Amino acid sequence: MYFRCESAVLSGFVLMFIARITWLKLVSFAHTNYDIRVLSQSIEKGATHGSSIDEENIKGPTINSVVYFMLAPTLCYQPSYPRTAFTRKGWVTRQLIKCVVFTGLMGFIIEQYINPIVQNSKHPLKGNFLDAIERVLKLSVPTLYVWLCMFYSFFHLWLNILAELLRFGDREFYKDWWNAKTVEEYWRMWNMPVHKWIVRHIYFPCIRNGLSKGCAILIAFLVSAVFHELCIAVPCHIFKLWAFSGIMFQVCIDLKDTCISFLIFLD
């Protein structure tokens, strides 16, 4: 068994992933330092009581803090982070072995189960619609396992490995999204680095500027939808708005869940 993949598409996904992370980090860096400058100026003018401010978190950026932030497994900048006392080398080695195993398992599932189905499938617009549905259903199970392997390898293994090497103290990369009762809960819990970035740099600024909670959530989903579309459209050289539509469709599902919960509460 060997894994075949178009190098241009794979490298495109990797470059878009890195570019997206870098952009999110730079936005957080700019926003946070702007807030720090405003807070420092208010302290100098006596508008804010300096005794209630943590001076460690209002220091200006340094080369070391910027480099550490760009490498750290977080998207939200702050001048200092909680740090562990030492790096557990044995633990890192075990997690690296697990990461290699699950990455290989992901490649095995793609090559042995997903690629044959895709290669034997007709174009849904040129073939029988029922055949297209059958192929999608056949792809659903192996695709689910690939997604779970990806989630475990990246969020549970790789981010913790990176955090351990950098002695990064905040290890909340996800919550128990498998227990989510609504779509809104799922999106809040499955990807904590992105969720924290959206809350800090999109949701709260919208609220501070007088927008309603619902409007702020809609803008957050809109930004997420644009990024998902870019991450697929650019590497694959297609622009069909599939990812954008899929993310925005989650808003409709969330509204439906909210209405149902409200009706149950009234009963």
Image (cartoon, grey):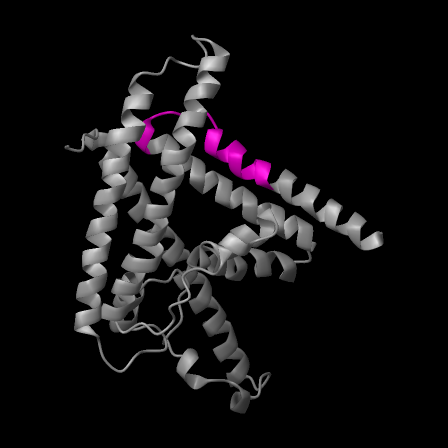
Measured along the vertical axis of the image, is residue 58 above or below residue 35?
Answer: below
Q: Quadrant of residue 49?
A: bottom right
Residue 143, position as x, y percentages in the image: 38, 35
Main secondary structure found in the magenta portion: helix
**As drawn, which residue projects farthest toward the left?**
2
Tell me the quadrant of the picture where the N terminus can be found: top left
Which residue is at the front of the view, 205 or 74? Answer: 74
What residue appears at the point 42 percent right and 79 percent down from the top-left corner?
Answer: 57
Q: Is residue 193 magenta?
A: no
Q: Quadrant of residue 97?
A: bottom left
Q: Which residues are magenta?
A: 235-250
Q: Which x, y percent locates residue 19?
A: 31, 47
Q: Position of residue 91 (x, y in %)?
A: 22, 69
Which x, y percent locates residue 37? 46, 73
At x 51% / y 58%, what residue is drawn?
201
Visible in this render: residue 19? Answer: no
Residue at the image position 47 percent from the left and 34 percent from the top: 243
Residue 35 located left or right of residue 120: right
Q: Is residue 153 above or below residue 164?
A: above
Q: Is residue 195 visible?
A: yes
